[in-house]
Image (cartoon, grey):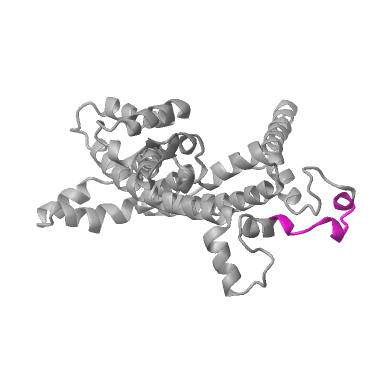
Amino acid sequence: MALPAYADPLERIWYYTYHAICITIFVFLIAPILIVMPLSFNAEPYFTFTEKMLTLDPDGYSLRWYDLLLTFGMSAPDLPRDGTWWSDVWQNATWVKAAKNSIIIGFWSTIVATVLGTLAALGLSRPEMPYRRLIMAILISPMIVPIIIIATGLFFYYSDPCAPLGWVGIELNCGRLTSTYTGVILAHATLGIPFVIITVTATLIGFDQSLSRAAASLGASPQRTFFKIILPLILPGVVSGALFAFVTSFDEVVAVLFIAGPEQQTIPRQMWNGIREAISPAILSVATILVLISICLLATVEVLRRRSERLRGVTPQ
């Protein structure tokens, strides 16, 4: 909003000071990203800007670290890049396998979190629901409880064969950790459910319950009412919650360190291993790709938010 012409000197000082503070905070938050992205194109194996990079010399920039994401772990990285080479990448490349695990675990955990979170939000939105605040506090507790506590609890819970879900989790065979995709998916779904509940509940605040009563008076079953009336109106909130759940799963490393085995190694865990064992600028390349993915997902969430406001008759600001 522009500064009005009748503003006094004190209001003008506060106006410019406020904008300066906002710009400073924005630069402080965005600076690490602005540093990481150009460093991922460094031709040298350093985490600093070289003289050639500072002088914008083309020889100082390279895609070698992005190429390393495909060749690291391959059995024959120097062969001609034909179908056999790409098959080797798909089967043996360490970063590619980590990406496949992240996508598989993220996809299924998002499905589970979205379904359960949406059902929970629908139940909590009903005024006759008893102990709504207590149940809501319990369901969103994974957002509040430190992740290290959740990961430790999941580890001991999965490793107990007498537990109801002990069969999905962890075994120790000759000192080696053996885990399953099901255990990791359920763990990530637990962390994603609160985001789905919050976004869907926020969407249901503007939902007109008389639409459901009108559908019931016309003979529609509860299932038909949900899929034909309720779901189309709350779909932006459901998709937004699903995106947040997917990002949470895609970014999770602590739970994976506790309950995942070597076969379930995800991108964050591979980055963790790379930092601890052999630091490589390839991590910067992965970070840049993840930043771009996050930007696309946030843009999608914003588009869905605006669509939801239009459907509810609220004009986006």
Q: Quadrant of residue 41?
A: bottom right
The location of residue 122, given as percent across then percent down, is 26, 42
Q: Which of the two residues, 58 or 23, is positioned nearer the viewer here?
A: 58
As drawn, 252 above or below 55 = above
Is residue 212 rendered to the left or right of residue 47? Answer: left
Q: Which of the two residues, 206 or 61, is positioned nearer the viewer here?
A: 61
Tell me, yes or no, whether the highlighted magenta stretch contains residue 161.
Answer: no
Q: Residue at x 74, y 44 (%)?
A: 35
Q: Residue at x 15, y 51 (%)?
A: 222
Q: Which corner quadrant holds the N terminus? A: top right
The location of residue 136, given as percent across then percent down, is 31, 30
As drawn, 69 above or below 32 = below
Q: Residue at x 9, y 57 (%)?
A: 219
Q: Quadrant of residue 71?
A: bottom right
Q: Residue at x 59, y 39 (%)?
A: 272
Is residue 63 rendered to the left or right of residue 169? Answer: right
The location of residue 48, given as percent across then percent down, is 80, 42
Residue 315 visible in the picture: no
**Furthest residue to the bottom?**
82
The location of residue 58, given as percent across then percent down, is 85, 60
Is residue 82 rendered to the left or right of residue 128? Answer: right
Residue 50 visible in the picture: yes
As drawn, 14 above or below 179 = above
Number of numbered discs overlaid on the protein picture: 0
The residue range painted magenta reads 52-65
Is residue 219 rendered to the left or right of residue 62? Answer: left
**Furthest residue to the front?**
174
